Amino acid sequence: MFKNPVGEFSSPHRAGPYLMKKFCLAFVVLLFLSASLAVAQTPYTMEPTDAPAELPKTLSALLNSKGVRLLQAKNGAPTIVCEVWWAKSIESHTSTSKTSTPYEGLATGALVGVLRFVEEGEDSRDQKMQAGFYTLRYAKVEADPEHSDNGAPQDAVLASPLWADKHPDQVMKLDELLRVSRLSSKTKKPVVINLMPVNPAYTEMPALITDDQGDCMVQVKVQLKAAAKAKPAEMPVSILLVTPIREDGES
């Protein structure tokens, strides 16, 4: 119940058309302002970027000419977080697993793209990564207890230094991929960048997605390499590029 403009008490169903129109208009304005505020509070933006000329020609030929650049607002100015260029086509296979995930069709060790950090970066498990270029290859890796709620294996891309990935046009065996990826972290652990569940609400890609936990993801459609006489297929991919700062000061 509420008090209407003429001083009577009535239910909303008996309110005059004018009052109901004002109520609906105010509600729409409130939603718009809330959405605008949410956008304003998002520190990340995204823009297209050309493939860099300094990449080896054999690798550059495997990549799309346009990638995405992730920017973060710092002191009122946009600062580059990282850049990603996707492979023109990614090796795939038919999955027979009963517990398959959306990324199960990607071939283990297949080149997915190239990542560049302009300054020092981090992977999804808080490992430091020096500035520079890294190849990204698909693998399903064991869960990290500090970053997993259910202990299930994680779909991911493993980052390897450009100089250590000698044959980008070939699928790399998992043992070799783990070895060269450890060169990125200079530890006994490979550099893992998580692939996340695809959000179907984002139909236009590439899309920039942030959540209330502080994660930032870029969602794109990649091309899968078609088998003989088969039609090329597309696959949506969501890659986790920024993780939140933890209470102990790590991110």
Image (cartoon, rainbow, N blue to C red):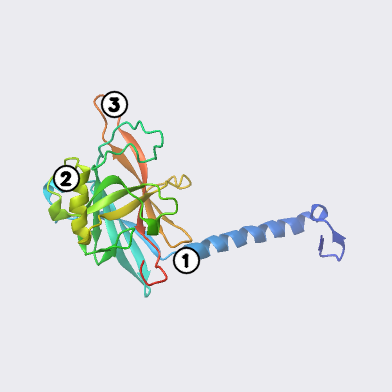
Q: Around disc 1, counting alpha carbons within 10 Å, would you say few (fewer than 14), some (14 to 19), or many (20 or more)?
A: few
Q: Circle 2 sits in a helix, a strand or a loop, which is it?
A: loop
Instruction: Say whether disc 3 or disc 1 marks the residue closer to the N-terminus.
Output: 1
CB contact under 8 Å: marks 2 and 1: no
* Location of residue 147 in the rendering, given as x and y in whole percent from the top left corner: 39, 57
Q: Please tell me the numbered disc located at residue 168.
A: 2
Which residue is rendered at x = 29% and y = 54% of the image? 192
Q: Of residues 4 and 155, which is closer to you in this image?
A: 155
Which corner quadrant of the image does residue 23 belong to?
Answer: bottom right
Q: Nearer the viewer, mark 3 or mark 2?
A: 2
Q: CA distance from mark 3 to mark 2?
A: 24 Å
Q: CA distance from mark 2 to mark 1?
A: 40 Å
Q: Of residues 46 and 241, which is closer to you in this image?
A: 241
Which kind of residue does numbered mark 2 sit on? Answer: Pro
Q: Around disc 3, counting alpha carbons within 10 Å, would you say few (fewer than 14), some (14 to 19), or many (20 or more)?
A: few
> Label 3 belongs to which residue?
230
Which residue is rendered at x = 38% and y = 47% of the image? 205
Q: In this picture, is 29 found above or below 230?
A: below
* Location of residue 42 in the rendering, given as x and y in whole percent from the top left corner: 44, 64
* Location of residue 198 in the rendering, given as x and y in whole percent from the top left corner: 42, 46
> Label 1 belongs to which residue?
40
Which kind of residue does numbered mark 3 sit on? Answer: Ala
Q: Circle 3 sits in a helix, a strand or a loop, which is it?
A: loop
Which kind of residue does numbered mark 1 sit on? Answer: Ala
Q: Of residues 133 and 1, which is closer to you in this image?
A: 133
Instruction: Say whether disc 3 or disc 2 marks the residue closer to the N-terminus.
Output: 2
Q: Of residues 118 and 187, which is closer to you in this image?
A: 187
Q: Is 26 left or right of 217, judged from the image as shown?
A: right
* Location of residue 201 in the rendering, given as x and y in whole percent from the top left corner: 48, 47
Which residue extends farthest top? 229
Q: In this picture, is 204 found above or below 127?
A: above
Residue 55 visible in the picture: no
